[in-house]
């Protein structure tokens, strides 16, 4: 074997997965067809749960050095969405351009000894009972391969997944542009998802948001486009003037492309020794700013499981939980973006539906439910006694509990040391800590997976059963 895992794609999903593997001292090689990172801004916000994910590995402070904004509200089909009352230390979106997140993760991968090969384009793959062979400029052999190569994934096509869903019916244009003052100064602070948005009665719209660099902005517009065509500078210029007239001056266009409302999800996230993650597994409109976050959390779910199986401390069947957990989460995101598309449709029935939905969103409980869906904080993998839910961060007296997860191990938190003693045989795989309290008063102890989700509580089965299921047999 050349390595333990081959990751195809050096975007935030592939790099997040690779850092997880490298943290566990699993050998990983990331390959990417591009010779360098893309200069396009692409995704530009971290939802609260993704902020928590980075914090669990000590990476949030590093990423936040590149932050361009804190956006204190989200939206559902442009209906304002409050992030209050979600039980997180980060009740806001962090404005962070995708290339900055990739730079942080690439730097971390290098620190951990992982390998990145650019200019390496996968053309074929073969797998057998022992491993996977990736064919490109050279041949690489590994125990497993993960596809993080985007919505047009070569790996997914080679696997023959039908990628079912809905076709595109409209196209929105996105451009990184340089703006100057016209009759007004372009907004340099990004504080709201609806900032500088223009909406016309026919449903066309546009918005501009600062990208944190001098005069650099994102210009997004929809003007009724129903077919994918090449984007020209002339088109972008005409659209800008149509929406903003002489309010701002368009000085230059750096990049421009289109995205559609196509919505598709792979039938399977696992094909024997090959896994799909991020846009390779699901595509949907970027409504609500969920795409990058969904993909990064795919990687966070899969990474520690692969490392644990490869390390020989858990059965190979643990990898089946990736499909069971993340396919359902992806389906829910696809459903909510489809719903948002319906709420934005400009016919009388949908306008009436939108008005009623906007009224419901003013009810605190309804707002929290939708906000939990959009932010990722509401993900629940299912179980009794808080099993399957995320562990909210809290202070232990010695610091924040999130700091215990920096090593990538599981964590056992208990108010009674008897639970810590019962888990002593697994001390090489989990961190055992006595705490004065837990977020749930009815509990005396919780066992938490490396990705921050509870996999056992003192209200459920004996702890040894859960330890063996998630972390393997004791030595």
Image (cartoon, rainbow, N blue to C red):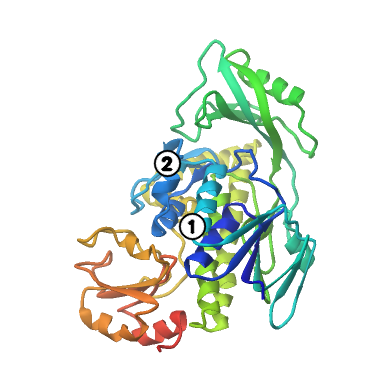
Secondary structure under tag 1 reads helix
Point out residue 463 in the picture as x, y percentages from the top left corner: 35, 84
Residue in the foreground of this view, choosing between 88 and 354: 88
Residue in the foreground of this view, choosing between 302 and 330: 302
Task: Tell me what residue is drawn at x 58 percent, y 50 percent.
Answer: 291
On the question of residue 361 being in view, the answer is no
- Identify the image quadrant of residue 361: top left
Q: Residue furthest top?
A: 183
Task: Tell me what residue is drawn at x 77 percent, y 64 percent.
Answer: 138
Task: Tell me what residue is drawn at x 69 percent, y 78 percent.
Answer: 131
Which numbered tag is attached to residue 65? 2
Point out residue 229 in the picture as x, y percentages from the top left corner: 80, 36
Q: Residues within 10 Å of mark 1 (few under 14, many from 20)?
A: few
Point out residue 39 in the picture as x, y percentages from the top left corner: 63, 38
Task: Specify whether 83 is left or right of 293.
Answer: left
Q: Quadrant of the N terminus?
A: bottom right
Height in image: 398 above or below 468? above
- Marks 2 and 1, Cα distance to the nearest angstrom? 18 Å
Height in image: 341 above or below 441? above
Task: Specify whether 443 is left or right of 344.
Answer: left
Residue in the foreground of this view, choosing between 209 and 410: 410
Q: Which residue is mark 1?
A: 111
On the question of residue 138 being in view, the answer is yes
């Amino acid at each position: 074997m050349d390595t333990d895992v081959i990751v195809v794609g050096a975007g935030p999903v592939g790099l997040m997965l690779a850092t997880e593997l490298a943290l566990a001292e699993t050998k990983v090689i990331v390959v990417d067809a591009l010779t360098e990172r893309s200069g396009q801004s692409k995704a530009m916000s971290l939802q609260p749960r993704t902020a928590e994910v980075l914090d669990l590995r000590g990476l949030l402070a590093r990423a936040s050095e590149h932050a361009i904004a804190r956006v204190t509200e989200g939206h559902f089909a442009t209906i304002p969405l409050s992030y209050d009352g979600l039980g997180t230390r980060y009740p806001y979106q962090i404005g962070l351009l995708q290339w900055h997140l990739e730079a942080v993760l690439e730097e971390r991968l290098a620190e951990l000894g992982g390998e990145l090969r650019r200019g390496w384009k996968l053309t074929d793959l073969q797998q057998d009972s022992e491993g996977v062979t990736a064919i490109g400029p050279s041949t690489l052999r590994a125990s497993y391969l993960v596809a993080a190569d985007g919505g047009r994934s070569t790996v997914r096509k080679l696997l023959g997944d039908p990628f079912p869903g809905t076709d595109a019916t409209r196209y929105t244009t996105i451009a990184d542009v340089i703006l100057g003052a016209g009759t007004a100064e372009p907004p340099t602070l990004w504080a709201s998802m609806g900032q500088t948005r223009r909406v016309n009665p026919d449903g066309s719209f546009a918005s501009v948001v600062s990208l944190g660099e001098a005069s650099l902005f994102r210009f997004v517009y929809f003007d009724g486009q129903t077919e994918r065509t090449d984007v020209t500078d002339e088109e972008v210029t005409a659209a800008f003037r149509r929406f903003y007239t002489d309010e701002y001056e368009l000085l230059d266009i750096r990049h421009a492309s289109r995205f559609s409302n196509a919505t598709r999800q792979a039938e399977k996230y696992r094909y024997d020794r090959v896994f799909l993650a991020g846009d390779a597994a699901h595509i949907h409109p970027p409504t609500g700013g969920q795409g990058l976050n969904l993909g990064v959390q795919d990687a966070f779910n899969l990474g520690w499981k692969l490392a644990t199986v490869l390390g020989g401390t858990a059965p190979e069947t643990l990898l089946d939980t990736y499909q069971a957990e993340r396919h359902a989460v992806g389906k829910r995101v696809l459903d909510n973006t489809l719903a948002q598309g319906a709420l934005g449709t400009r016919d009388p029935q949908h306008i009436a539906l939108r008005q009623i939905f906007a009224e419901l969103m003013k009810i605190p409980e309804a707002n929290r439910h939708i906000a939990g869906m959009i932010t990722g904080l509401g993900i629940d993998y299912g179980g009794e006694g808080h099993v399957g839910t995320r562990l909210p961060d809290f202070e232990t007296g010695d610091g924040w509990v999130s700091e215990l997860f920096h090593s990538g191990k599981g964590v056992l938190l208990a108010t009674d040391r008897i639970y810590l003693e019962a888990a002593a045989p697994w001390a090489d795989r989990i961190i055992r800590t006595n705490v004065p309290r837990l977020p749930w008063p009815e509990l005396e102890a919780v066992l938490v997976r490396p990705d921050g989700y509870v996999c056992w509580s003192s209200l459920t089965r004996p702890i040894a059963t859960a330890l063996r299921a998630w972390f393997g047999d004791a030595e």
